C-alpha cells in the first residue's frame, strides 16, 4: 500500500511538471494570449464551397480551443475585399486565411509584414515579387476527381452490361464554372477515371460562367440530362446540379450525380453516387501551429512545396472521397476506390496518361499527346492542365 501511494505521488508530480512545461512553452511563444486567426470567405455556409472551408475553421477551433480566437468575414466581394481584411488586421489577426480570388492579400502583406496571409492559389496570382508573409495553397483535387470518375465508370459499366444502356448511349456530363485550367484539369481527370472502367464513354461539358449561380447551374444540368447524360459531375459551388438530377430521377430518367465540396445525399438521396472535397483542415491547423511556434509555415506543413505555395493529395489527407452511396453504386466500388487511392498515395498511378491527344482551346497551336504523361501540380498548387481531349470531350458552350 505504501509503495502504491509513493507511485501515485510520483505520477502526479510528473503530470504537474509536464503541464508546467507546456504552459511555459505556450507563454514563451504567444505571451499567454490567444492567437487571433481571421477567415475571409467569398460566400457563406449556404454554399457548399464555403461550408466546406468552414469545416477547417471549426477543426482549428476544436484542435486549439481557447489558444485561438477566430474572426470571420463572409460574403466578401472581390472589389471590396480590402476593407474587411483591414478590419481583421486592426482587430489583431496574426494569420488570415482567404478562400477567394483577389490580389488584395498581396498588397496587404507588403503593408503588414507581421501578419501571415494565406490564400487559396488562383491561376492569375503569382508568388513572384510577393513578400515572405504571403502564402498560397491548394489541394491536388484531380486525384479525388479521378477516383470519383472510376466509381462513375463502374456504374456506367453496370448499366451497359445489364442492357439498361446501349454502347452508343454511354454519355456523361459535367457542369463547370468556366474554361480555366482548374476546371479543365478536373473534368479531364474525372473523365479519364470513367473511361478506365467504361471505354465507350463520351463526355459533354457545359459552363455556367460563374462559380455560384443556382439558376444557371440548374439550366445547364437540365440540358445535359435532356441530351442523354446518365451521370453528371460538377465543378460549381451550389447544390443545383444534384437537385436537378434528383428531380429527373424521380420523373423516371436514368441519371446519377457526383458531387463536390460536400455530400449531396440530403438533396439527392436516390441518385447521389459519391462526392469529393478538398479538406482544408490539415493546412489550416499546421499553418497556425507554425505561427504559434514562430516557425516558417512551409517547413511546418506536410505537403509538396513550390516555394511558398503548397499542395497535397490523399497522402496528406488534403482531398477526400465522401459518402459513397452503396445502395446504388456498382458492386466492388468501395474496394476499387480504396486500391486506387492507395496507388495514388504511393505515386504508382498515372492519371493524365493514355492514348489521347488534346488541344488548348485558347491556342489551337498548343497541343498535347498523353502517351507522354502530364504530371499535374508538379510546379504549382493551382492546376495547369488545360487541354480538351480530341474526339471524347465535347464542350457545348
Image: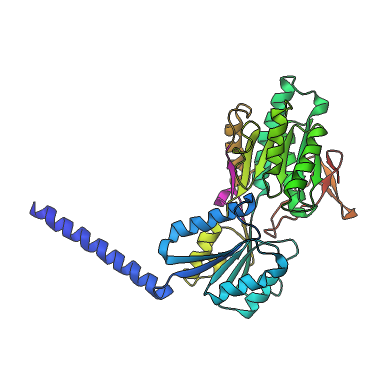
Horizontal side, residue 78 vs residue 274: left or right:
right
Looking at the rendering, the stretch of residues picked out in magenta corresponds to 312-323
Q: Nearer the viewer, residue 150 or 53?
A: 53
Q: Is residue 87 above or below residue 152?
A: below
Asked if the stretch drawn in magenta spans residue 313, the answer is yes
Residue 270 spot, x, y in % from top left: 63, 30
Residue 233 spot, x, y in % from top left: 71, 40
Residue 178 spot, x, y in % from top left: 79, 52
**Any part of residue 214 in sight:** yes
Q: Nearer the viewer, residue 128 or 107?
A: 107
Horizontal side, residue 292 vs residue 208: left or right:
left
**Any part of residue 281 in sight:** no
Residue 24 image-quadrant placement: bottom left
Asked if the stretch drawn in magenta spans residue 292, the answer is no
Horizontal side, residue 374 vs residue 114: left or right:
right
- Residue placed at 55% from the left, 50% from the top? 317
Q: Nearer the viewer, residue 284 or 303?
A: 284
Q: Nearer the viewer, residue 188 or 372?
A: 188
- Residue placed at 66% from the left, 42% from the top? 259
Report the number of numbered marks.
0
Amino acid at each position: 500500500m505504501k509503495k502504491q501511494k509513493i507511485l501515485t505521488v510520483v505520477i502526479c508530480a510528473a503530470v504537474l511538471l509536464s503541464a508546467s512545461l507546456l504552459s511555459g512553452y505556450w507563454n514563451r511563444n504567444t505571451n499567454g494570449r490567444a492567437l487571433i486567426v481571421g477567415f475571409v470567405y467569398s460566400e457563406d455556409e449556404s454554399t457548399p464551397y464555403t461550408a466546406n472551408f468552414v469545416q477547417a475553421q471549426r477543426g482549428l477551433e476544436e484542435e486549439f480551443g481557447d489558444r485561438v480566437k477566430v474572426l470571420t468575414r463572409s460574403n466578401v466581394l472581390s472589389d471590396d475585399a480590402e476593407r474587411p481584411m483591414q478590419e481583421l488586421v486592426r482587430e489583431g489577426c496574426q494569420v488570415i486565411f482567404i478562400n477567394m480570388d483577389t490580389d488584395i492579400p498581396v498588397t496587404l502583406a507588403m503593408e503588414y509584414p507581421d501578419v501571415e496571409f494565406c490564400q487559396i492559389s488562383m491561376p492569375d496570382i503569382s508568388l513572384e515579387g510577393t513578400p515572405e508573409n504571403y502564402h498560397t495553397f491548394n489541394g491536388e483535387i484531380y486525384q479525388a476527381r479521378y477516383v470519383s470518375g472510376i466509381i462513375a465508370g463502374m456504374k456506367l459499366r453496370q448499366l451497359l452490361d445489364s442492357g439498361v444502356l446501349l454502347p452508343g448511349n454511354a454519355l456523361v456530363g459535367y457542369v463547370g464554372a468556366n474554361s480555366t485550367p482548374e476546371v479543365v484539369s478536373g473534368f479531364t481527370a474525372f473523365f479519364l477515371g470513367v473511361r478506365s472502367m467504361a471505354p465507350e464513354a463520351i463526355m459533354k461539358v457545359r459552363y455556367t460562367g460563374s462559380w455560384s449561380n443556382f439558376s444557371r447551374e440548374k439550366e445547364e444540368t437540365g440540358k445535359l440530362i435532356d441530351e442523354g447524360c446518365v451521370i453528371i459531375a460538377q465543378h460549381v459551388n451550389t447544390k443545383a446540379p444534384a437537385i436537378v438530377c434528383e428531380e429527373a430521377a424521380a420523373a423516371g430518367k436514368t441519371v446519377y450525380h457526383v458531387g463536390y465540396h460536400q455530400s449531396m445525399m440530403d438533396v439527392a438521396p436516390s441518385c447521389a453516387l459519391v462526392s469529393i472535397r478538398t479538406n482544408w483542415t490539415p493546412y489550416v491547423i499546421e499553418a497556425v501551429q507554425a505561427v504559434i511556434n514562430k516557425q516558417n509555415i512551409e517547413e511546418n506543413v506536410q505537403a509538396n512545396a513550390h516555394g511558398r505555395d503548397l499542395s497535397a493529395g490523399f497522402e496528406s489527407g488534403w482531398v477526400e472521397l465522401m459518402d459513397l452511396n452503396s445502395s446504388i453504386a456498382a458492386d466492388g466500388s468501395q474496394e476499387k476506390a480504396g486500391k486506387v487511392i492507395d496507388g495514388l498515395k504511393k505515386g504508382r498511378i498515372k492519371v493524365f496518361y493514355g492514348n489521347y491527344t488534346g488541344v488548348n482551346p485558347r491556342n489551337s497551336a498548343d497541343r498535347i499527346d498523353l502517351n507522354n504523361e502530364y504530371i499535374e501540380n508538379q510546379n504549382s498548387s493551382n492546376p495547369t492542365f488545360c487541354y480538351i481531349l480530341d474526339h471524347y470531350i465535347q464542350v457545348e458552350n
